[in-house]
Image (cartoon, coloured by chain):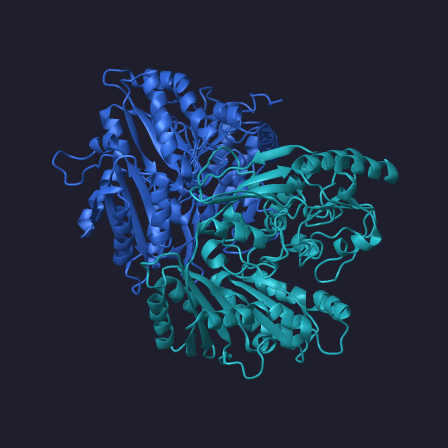
Chain colours: A blue, B cyan
Amino acid sequence: MPDTAMLARLREILGEAGVLTDPDRLAIYLVDQRDLVRGAAPAVLRPSSTEQVMAIMRLASEHRVGIVPQAGNTSYCAGATPDGSGEQFVLSLERLDKVRAVDALDATLSVDAGVILKHAQEAAEAAGLYLPLSLGSEGTCRIGGVIGTNAGGLSVLRYGMTRDLVLGLEVVLPDGTLVNDMRKLRKNNTGYDIRQNFIGAEGTLGVVTGAVLKLIPMPTRRATAWVELAPDVPLPEMLALVRRETSDLVSSFEFITARSLALVAADGGRLKSGSGGVILVELSSSSKHLPIEEVLEGAMGEVVEQGWAEDVIIAQAEAQRAEMWRIRETIPEGEKRFGGSVKHDISVPLGRTVDFLKEGGAAVAAYDPSFELSVYGHVGDGNLHYNILVPPGEDRLAFTDRVTRELAPRLYDIAVGMGGTFSAEHGVGRLKRGLLQHYADPGRYRVLRGLKGLFDPHGVMNPGAMVDPSIGLPD
Amino acid sequence: MPDTAMLARLREILGEAGVLTDPDRLAIYLVDQRDLVRGAAPAVLRPSSTEQVMAIMRLASEHRVGIVPQAGNTSYCAGATPDGSGEQFVLSLERLDKVRAVDALDATLSVDAGVILKHAQEAAEAAGLYLPLSLGSEGTCRIGGVIGTNAGGLSVLRYGMTRDLVLGLEVVLPDGTLVNDMRKLRKNNTGYDIRQNFIGAEGTLGVVTGAVLKLIPMPTRRATAWVELAPDVPLPEMLALVRRETSDLVSSFEFITARSLALVAADGGRLKSGSGGVILVELSSSSKHLPIEEVLEGAMGEVVEQGWAEDVIIAQAEAQRAEMWRIRETIPEGEKRFGGSVKHDISVPLGRTVDFLKEGGAAVAAYDPSFELSVYGHVGDGNLHYNILVPPGEDRLAFTDRVTRELAPRLYDIAVGMGGTFSAEHGVGRLKRGLLQHYADPGRYRVLRGLKGLFDPHGVMNPGAMVDPSIGLPD
C-alpha cells in the first residue's frame, strides 16, 4: 500500500487528530529521552480507543508496516524510537488516558495504558490506597511504558518490580487480536500466565492497552535515615540486618557515593557523605499501632554498634525527609548539568554489590585513571547505577560511544561473571540488543526468538527493539 | 521404536535403578492424590541429573512418546497422572533431590526440582532465613510441582504465590534443549521473562529441573488471633482494616466456617466458632524492635469496635497458636474422614468474597437443600475452598461426578461472573481442561494454544494436561 493510501486509511480509522504528520509536531516523538538516537516516521498515530489500536495493528500486519509503540517516551535505551528509514509509524498511547476504575475493597486500579504514572498514583490515593511504583520520571512516563519495560524504581525492595503489581492486562496482538485478561485476582491458576510475556517485552510482542494494578494500604507514616557510612562497610550484611530488624518494612535502601552527592548538594548543605558514601533508608507503614520510628531507631542502633556508620541522621520533620529524597532523586539532573554521564544499569546478586564496586572501580581506573564515577542506586535490590561522568570539554556523544565500545563490555563482563546483568531496570531497547544476544544463555535466546516469531510472525511490532531479527541464532 | 528397544535405551541412559517397570512399584505413580484418576505407563523414569532429563526428552521427542513429569504427586486436578493408554511414561523428579546452595547474603536458595518442600524450608532455616511457602502437603510435595502449579498456600497474602518467589529456573525443553536461567537477581530486564511460561504450566511446556528461590528474613515472632465472627461481617472491609492497621505484617487471614470447624475440633475444644464463622489472623515479624503483639492488639481492638467479633482470642503461648493452626490445617483430613468432599477451588476479587458466599450458598441450596458445605480458605487472597461434603452413604466417586457435572458449573459461573476463576491455586491438570477452554477469553486461549505449539510441537510434554490438543480452537 503506498504511503498516501495508507495514511488515508489511517485517517479514516483515527480521525484527523489521530494522525500527526506535521514535522514540527512529530519531532518530539522521534528522538529518545537521552538524545542519543533520532528516527523518522511517516506519521505518529494517536488512537483513542482499544478498538482503534486493533484496527491499526490489523492494517499494519496486512501491509507489513512496522509499528513502534510509545508511551511517555522516557526510555533510557531507545526502546520507543523508530529507525531512520522513515517507514515505521509511531503509535503513541497518550490519548488512551482514562482511569477506568479504582476499587478500594478489591485494592485494584484499572487504567488505560496511556495514563501518566503520577495520575495513576493520584487515583489510588483518592481511594485511600497506594500504588507502590515510584520512578524519577513518574510525572511523564505512562503505564504502558512502565509495563512494557517492567519498570523498577525506588521501592522495589519492598514492593517488587512492575511485574509484581500487574494483576490484569489488556493487549492487542500484532495481528489485531484482542487479549482481554483484565483480572483483579490474587490467585488464578488457569493456564499459562500469558500476561508475563508482555510485561517487560518493550512492545515487541503486542500493544498493552490496559492494565489492572495491585494497590496496597496507603503508607501514612514514614521514618527516614541518612546514614553516613564508615569506610569499607559490608553493604550486603548491612542490608540483611536492616531487612531483618525492620521486618522488611524498609521500602528504600539507596546508596549514594560522595561524588554523586557532590553533583547535587549545595555548598553548606547539612547532609553530607561519610567516608564510604551514604545509605538512605526509609521505612513506611500504614498502621497507627506500629511505632515505626522506634523500629528505625532500633535497627539504626545496631548499624552503629556494628561500626558501619560515622553518623546517622533520622529525619525529624517532613522537610528534612524531603531534602534527603530531593538529593537522591536529582542526581540524574546533576549528572546532566555536569555534562552528562555514560550509564551502566547493572545488577548483581544482593551479596555481591561491594565486590562489584571494587572490581568495577579497578576496571575503570585501569582504562583511564582520570575518569570520574557517579555511582548510586537501589543497592537494596542489587541494582547500581554505575555511571561515568563525561569529562569537561569532551563531546558527549563521542565519549559515550567510546566508553560504550571500549569500557562498558569490561564492566558488563564483571557483573555477568558475578551472576549479574547488563540491564537491571532500563531494559534492552535498541541500544543493548547486541548485549542481550552476547550474554543470553543459548537455550534461553532460542526461546526469546521463538516467542518473537510466535507473537509477531511478520515482524511489525516495534521492529529493531530487543530481539533483532537480523541477528542470527546462536549455534 | 518398539517398547522393548525404547526401554533398553532408557536403561542405558538411566541405569537399572532409573527405570521402574515392576507393576507393584509403579502403582503409586499411576493414581492421583485424590484417587479420582488411574493411569497406566510402560515405566516410571527416575533421572538423577539434568543431563539424564535432557536425554529422556530427546528420545521422547524423536519417537513422539508422551512424558508425564511428576514431582510429589499431590495434584488435586490429576496434573501428573498418565492416561490409560499405557503409552505415556512417568518422569519422576524424586531423585533430583539435592539442595544446590543456600546463600544468606544473596537471600537465595538453589535447589533441584525434586527437593521436598519441607527440606527446602529446612535448608533456608539452617541459614537463618525463611522460604515463605507453606502448604498442607509440604512434607510430600516437591519444588518442581510447586513451581509447575504455581502453588499458593497459607501466606500468599503477604509473600505472594510461588511465581513471586522464583528468581531463577533451569528447564529442559521437550526437544531436550537446556534453558539455564538460574539467576539470583531481584532486577533483570533483559528480554522476555521466559521463566514465567514454565511457572504454573503443569509440566506441559518443559521439565523444570532446578530453581533459585527468594528467601526472606526468618520470622522470629508471631502473633496470632482467633476471631469469632459476628453474623454478616463484611469480610472485605475487615481484611482492608487488618491489612492497613498491621501495615501488611499480616501473613495469614484464613476463614473457617462452623461446619468446617466441626469436622476437626474435638468436643469440648476451647476454640469455637462465632455466628459468622472464624477468621484466623497471624502477623509475623523478624525484628526484635517491633512490638508485634501490640500491633495485633491494636488492629483487633478496631475489629471489635466495628462490631465484627463476638470474641477475639489472642494466642498466649506457642501451644495455643499451634492448636489454632492444627485446626485450620487438618480440615482436608477432617473432610476425608467424614467421607470426602467435592472441591471447588474458586477465587474472586478481594471485595467479592461475601457476595460469593451468599450467591454460592443459594445455588447449592437450590440444587439440593440437604447438601452440606465445608467452606474455608485463604479469604485474604479472595480464595475460598468451597467444598460440598459427600453425604453419608453416597458413593464418593459417583457423587463427585454428579456434582461436577450438575452443580459445579453453576458455582463457577457465579465466580467467573464476579471476575473470579474456577481454579485459584490447584490448577487445571486433566480435570479442569474443559473449564479452561469454556471460560478463557478467546484471544487468551489462542495464545495458550500457540505457546503449547511453540514449546511442544510434537505434543510429548504431559499430554492431556491443561491444554488438550484434541479440543479445537474457539472461533
* Position in image of residue B426 (x %, y %): 62, 57
Instruction: Say which quadrant the N terminus of chain A sits in.
Output: top right
Tell me which residue sits at (72%, 65%) in the image: B405
Q: Is B131 rendered above or below residue A437?
A: below
Can you see residue B98? yes
Name the image quarter holding the C terminus of chain A. top right
| Location of residue B378 with respect to B26 vertically, above or below | below
Q: Which image quadrant for residue A254? A: top left
Q: Position of residue B101 (x, y in %)?
A: 53, 41
Residue B266's place in the image compared with A362, above or below, is below
Q: Residue B186 at what x, y percent from top left?
A: 44, 41
Residue A75 shows in this picture:
no
Residue B244 shown left or right of residue B84 in the figure: left
Quarter of the rendering containing residue B203 = top right
Q: Nearer the viewer, residue B418 or A328?
A: A328
Please give the name of the residue rendered at 52% of the width and 40% of the height, measured from the top-left corner: A198
Left or right, B45 with reference to A187:
right
Residue A8 position, x and y percent, is: 49, 30
Give the left or right position of residue B37, taking residue B383 as reference: right
Question: Foreground residue, B196 or B234?
Answer: B196
